[in-house]
Image (cartoon, rainbow, N blue to C red):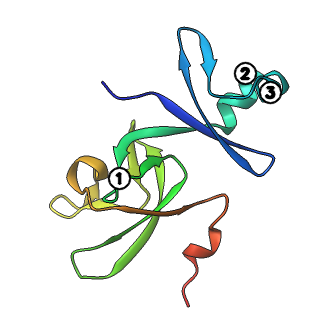
């Protein structure tokens, strides 16, 4: 069974938490009290249930890097797309359609996230 975990960025810091038996686990009480359930839901990023090639947990909003079939280094954001976790722009080469990136291609490397590392998408 996949772990249900989340992260949220508050005040320049990351907090990792889970929802167990109707209770929040892992968020400082003062932080929990300051957020409404809707704010917590809208701003939290879920763990996708997979780790990158270095053992780093992958969350929605992470920027991952991989080498495509042509040998080019690609970078994309992890997203929830078509009812599954995927990597924006990742395509299943055999079908030329958006593919299940995490089950078909497991050599991603987390290099940052969309909140702190937007510069990773600019080419030099």
User: Which of disc 1 and disc 3 is earlier in sequence?
Assistant: 3
Asked whether the beta carbons under mark 3 and mark 1 sit within 8 Å of each other, the answer is no
User: Which of disc 2 and disc 1 is earlier in sequence?
Assistant: 2
Residue 107 % position (x, y): 27, 62
Residue at the top extreme of this rendering: 21
| Res 6 label | none
**Quarter-wise, where is residue 72 in the image?**
bottom left
Q: Is residue 10 left or right of residue 72?
A: right
Question: Which residue is rendered at x = 41% and y = 52% of the image?
Answer: 56
Residue 39 lies, with reference to residue 19, above or below; the image says: below
Q: The C terminus appears in which quarter of the rendering?
A: bottom right
Q: Residues within 10 Å of mark 2 (few under 14, many from 20)?
A: few
Residue 80 lies, with reference to residue 62, above or below; the image says: above
Question: Which residue is rendered at x = 68% and y = 38% of the image?
Answer: 43
Q: Is residue 115 left or right of residue 50?
A: right
Question: Which residue is rendered at x = 51% and y = 55% of the image?
Answer: 62
**Residue occupied by mark 3:** 35
Q: Residues within 10 Å of mark 3 (few under 14, many from 20)?
A: few
**Residue occupied by mark 2:** 37
The answer for how far apart the CA atoms under marks 3 and 1 are is 31 Å
Residue 103 % position (x, y): 23, 47
Q: Is residue 15 left or right of residue 83?
A: right
Residue at the bottom extreme of this rendering: 124
Residue 78 lies, with reference to residue 34, above or below; the image says: below
Q: Nearer the viewer, residue 64 or 97?
A: 64
**Residue occupied by mark 1:** 55
Asked whether the beta carbons under mark 3 and mark 2 sit within 8 Å of each other, the answer is yes
> Label 1's element?
loop
Q: The N terminus appears in which quarter of the rendering?
A: top left
């Amino acid at each position: 069974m996949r772990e249900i975990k989340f992260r949220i960025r508050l005040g320049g810091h990351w907090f990792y938490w889970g929802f167990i038996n109707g209770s929040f686990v892992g968020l400082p009480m003062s932080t929990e009290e300051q957020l409404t359930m809707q704010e917590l839901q809208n701003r939290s990023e879920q763990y996708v249930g997979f780790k990158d090639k270095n053992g780093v947990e992958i969350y929605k909003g992470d920027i991952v890097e991989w080498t495509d079939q042509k040998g080019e280094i690609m970078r994309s954001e992890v997203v929830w797309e078509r009812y599954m976790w995927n990597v924006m722009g990742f395509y299943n080469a055999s079908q030329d359609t958006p593919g299940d990136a995490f089950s078909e291609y497991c050599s991603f490397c987390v290099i940052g996230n969309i909140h702190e590392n937007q510069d990773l998408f600019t080419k030099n």
